[in-house]
Every structure is written in C-alpha cells, then in structure tokens.
C-alpha cells in the first residue's frame, strides 16, 4: 500500500505524494495510460527549475537527481545560501523538497527506470531556438508517434501531466508558505531528510 502519512514539507511527504493513490490498472480501463519509456524523456517547466537548482543540466539520469537532492538537503542552510546567492531565498527553501519530489514522481510515480536518460530544458535548437513547454511536448508527441486507431488516446496523459505539474507547484507553494526561510526551520527539514534517508 502507499506509505504512511507525512507532515507537509518533509522529504517523506515528497516520497508519499506520487503514490498516495493505488496504481491504475490499464487493463481495467484505468484513467491514465502512459506509454513505456524506451528512449529518452524531456523534462520542462518546473522540472527544469529544480534540475538547474541541483546544478544538473543537459541530459541526466534519475539517479543523479536523487544524489544531487541528497547533497543539497545535507548542507547547512548558510552554505546553501552562500553557494546560491543568485536564487531567491524563498524559492531556494523549496528545492530540497523539489528534488525529492521530482525523483519520486519520475521513479515511483511514472516508474521510469534509472537508466532512462532525462533531457532537461525550456527550449530546443533546430537551426534556431524554439521555446518549449509540456503542452508543446504533447503536440510533438502526437505528431511524431501517431497511434493506431484502436490505441488509447494520450489525452489522459495530457491531463496526468497537467495534474502532476499543478500538484508539484501547489506542493512547492505550500512548502514555502509553511516553512519560512529561517535557519531553524531549514534544520528541521534537513533532520527529517536525514532520518528519511537513513530509513531508506
């Protein structure tokens, strides 16, 4: 079953969010059809922001997200602030949770194997720079990989991506609101992250 409840803002909460609902049974007409990932995955929007904060970029693996997230969450708040002076402190306070959440959504929510490369960005280059978003990704996917008439539509995938992105944004906003950027609250988050990592 799903993991037990965790207080909002804890790394354990990021682990629990993608799996609070029972997995959909595609054979029983579950609401979300996800094609198997066989090549690469392109992450955009807030995934790109979190990956940039974790000092990753280009093509990465899911395991690198986990490792960088652990490294960020394991640092003292003063060091994190010093190393990331260009980031807004309120935004910065959400990236420990964000790194754990992105990993959990990709690894446990979507079931991506750690070997699948994840390309990250907000634009593509094809002779010129083209801004990219998850909605454009759906359109490109539909154009590049047409489905036979009997195959399920990817509209549920579109809705799933929308819900996932919205949930991520709401979780980050709630985390930022509930955990003000103070060294004391950051230490509590770090302690919780360390306990969750030790339990894993």
Image (cartoon, rainbow, N blue to C red):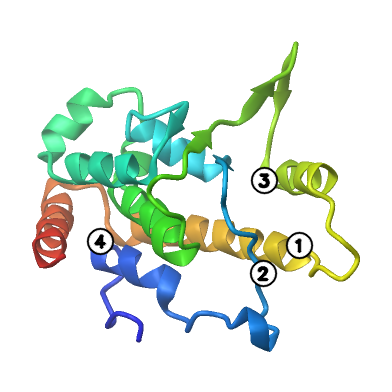
Of labels 3 and 2, earlier in sequence is 2
Q: Which residue is mark 2?
A: 33
Q: Residue at x 63, y 59 (%)?
A: 161
* Residue 191, horizontal then vertical, whole percent: 9, 58
Q: Report how far apart the C-alphas of labels 1 and 4 lie in the structure.
A: 31 Å
Q: Which residue is mark 3?
A: 134
Q: How many marks?
A: 4
In the figure, residue 41 lies in which quadrant? top right
Of labels 4 and 2, earlier in sequence is 4
Disc assigned to residue 154: 1
Q: Which residue is mark 4?
A: 11
Residue 172 visible in image: no
Q: Report how far apart the C-alphas of labels 4 and 2 lie in the structure.
A: 28 Å
**Up/down of 21 relative to 41, above or below:** below
**Up/down of 80 relative to 167, above or below:** above
Which of label 1 and label 3 is nearer to you?
A: 1
Q: Does the CB distance between marks 2 and 1 fall below 8 Å? A: yes
In the figure, residue 53 lies in which quadrant? top left
Of labels 4 and 3, earlier in sequence is 4
Q: Quadrant location of the C terminus?
A: bottom left
Q: Report how far apart the C-alphas of labels 2 and 1 lie in the structure.
A: 7 Å
Of labels 1 and 3, earlier in sequence is 3
Q: Residue at x 18, y 40 (%)?
A: 71
Instruction: Give the secondary structure at mark 4.
Output: helix
Mark 3 packing: few (<14 Cα in 10 Å), some, or many (20+)?
Answer: some
Q: Residue at x 29, y 79 (%)?
A: 3
Q: Report how far apart the C-alphas of labels 4 and 3 lie in the structure.
A: 26 Å
Mark 4 packing: few (<14 Cα in 10 Å), some, or many (20+)?
Answer: many
**Up/down of 26 relative to 135, above or below:** below
Residue 124 visible in image: yes
* Residue 165, horizontal then vertical, whole percent: 57, 56
Q: Residue at x 10, y 56 (%)?
A: 194
């Amino acid at each position: 079953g799903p993991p037990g409840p965790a207080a909002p803002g804890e790394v354990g909460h990021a682990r629990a969010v993608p799996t609070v609902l029972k997995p959909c049974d595609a054979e029983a007409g579950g609401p979300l059809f996800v094609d198997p990932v066989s090549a690469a995955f392109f992450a955009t929007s807030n995934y790109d922001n979190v990956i940039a904060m974790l000092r990753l970029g280009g093509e990465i693996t899911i395991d690198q997200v986990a490792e960088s997230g652990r490294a960020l969450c394991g640092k003292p708040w003063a060091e994190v602030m010093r190393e990331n002076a260009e980031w807004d402190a309120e935004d910065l306070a959400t990236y420990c949770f964000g790194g754990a959440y992105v990993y959990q959504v990709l690894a446990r929510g979507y079931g991506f194997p750690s070997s699948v490369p994840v390309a990250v960005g907000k634009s593509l280059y094809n002779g010129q720079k083209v801004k990219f978003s998850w909605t454009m990704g759906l359109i490109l996917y539909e154009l590049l990989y047409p489905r036979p008439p009997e195959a399920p539509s990817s509209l549920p995938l579109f809705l799933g991506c929308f819900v996932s992105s919205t949930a991520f944004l709401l979780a980050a906003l709630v985390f930022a609101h509930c955990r003000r950027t103070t060294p004391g609250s950051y230490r509590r988050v770090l302690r919780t992250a360390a306990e969750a990592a030790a339990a894993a």
